[in-house]
Image (cartoon, helix red, strand yellow):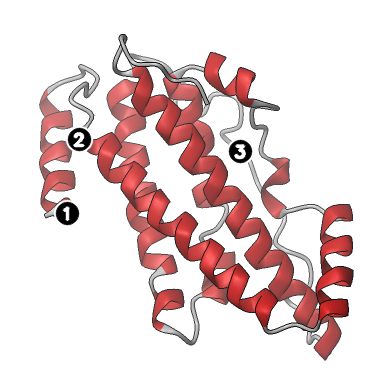
Amino acid sequence: MDRVVLLLSVVCLGVSSQPITDGRLFSIAVGRVQHLHLLAQRLFSDFESSLQTEEQRQLNKIFLQDFCNSDYIITPIDKHETQRSSVLKLLSISYRLVESWEFPSLSLSGGSAPRIQISPKLSELKTGILLLIKANQDGAELFPDSSALQLAPYGNYYQSLGADESLRRTYELLACFKKDMHKVETYLTVAKCRLSPEANCTL
């Protein structure tokens, strides 16, 4: 059903430049990212549960001093800036964040059934966000401030890792994925709320 709605939206966008105001596409996108965020939380929690207490402490300490690959993407610094940002800006940032996980998500997609869902659901979310961006552009250039944005691949991706480094990389990937899906969920929720002038979009 969701795929049908997305396809219908593509047709509608082809004949109209007016922003989508019924919120249907936003509802689908928010639902997608909420699912991914919950999935990320569950995977991270399961991974942490498999570690020894000291391993958890050390990895958390390292992660707090490290950076996620997507940290190179400029995002609102706090909830107040998020609420002041335009719908198009929030959509564009969300798109970049989701896009930044296209390659790393392949490393998260092996094994259990929930992991297998990650890459296809990210792809669906990216498509939905792009439709929303095009519908709300109103003549603005797509990604005008970073059309040539290139993110460096996650460190260690091309290396043969020892057990400790492999553990650290998995922890970082899951923690960063959880953090970024939370960001996208927040941005899309605020952007969706903006379509209702009478709504209270306070975070």
**What residue appears at the point 63 percent right and 66 percent down from the top-left corner?**
174
| Residue that carries the numbered disc 3 in the rendered image | 148
- The residues bearing labels 3 and 1 have C-alpha atoms spaced at a distance of 30 Å
Q: Secondary structure under badge 3?
A: loop
Give the labeled residue for mark 1.
3
User: In the rendered structure, are the residues bearing label 3 and label 2 in contact, judged by CB atoms less than 8 Å apart?
Assistant: no
Residue flagged by tag 1: what amino acid is it? Arg
Residue at 80 percent across and 84 percent down: it is: 52
**Residue 62 percent location from the top left of the image:** 88, 63
Instruction: Name the spot of residue 165 as percent of width and height, x first.
Output: 83, 80
Q: In terms of depth relative to the viewer, which is nearer, 169 or 27?
A: 27
Kind of residue at disc 2: Arg
At x 60%, y 58%, the residue is 177
The secondary structure type at the circle numbered 2 is helix
Residue nearest the observer in this picture, 14 or 162: 162
Residue 40's place in the image compared with 11, above or below, is: below
Q: CA distance from mark 2 to mark 1?
A: 12 Å
Residue 185 locus on image (x, y percent)? 47, 42
Tag 1 or tag 3, which sits nearer the N-term? 1
Q: Is residue 103 above or below residue 3?
A: below
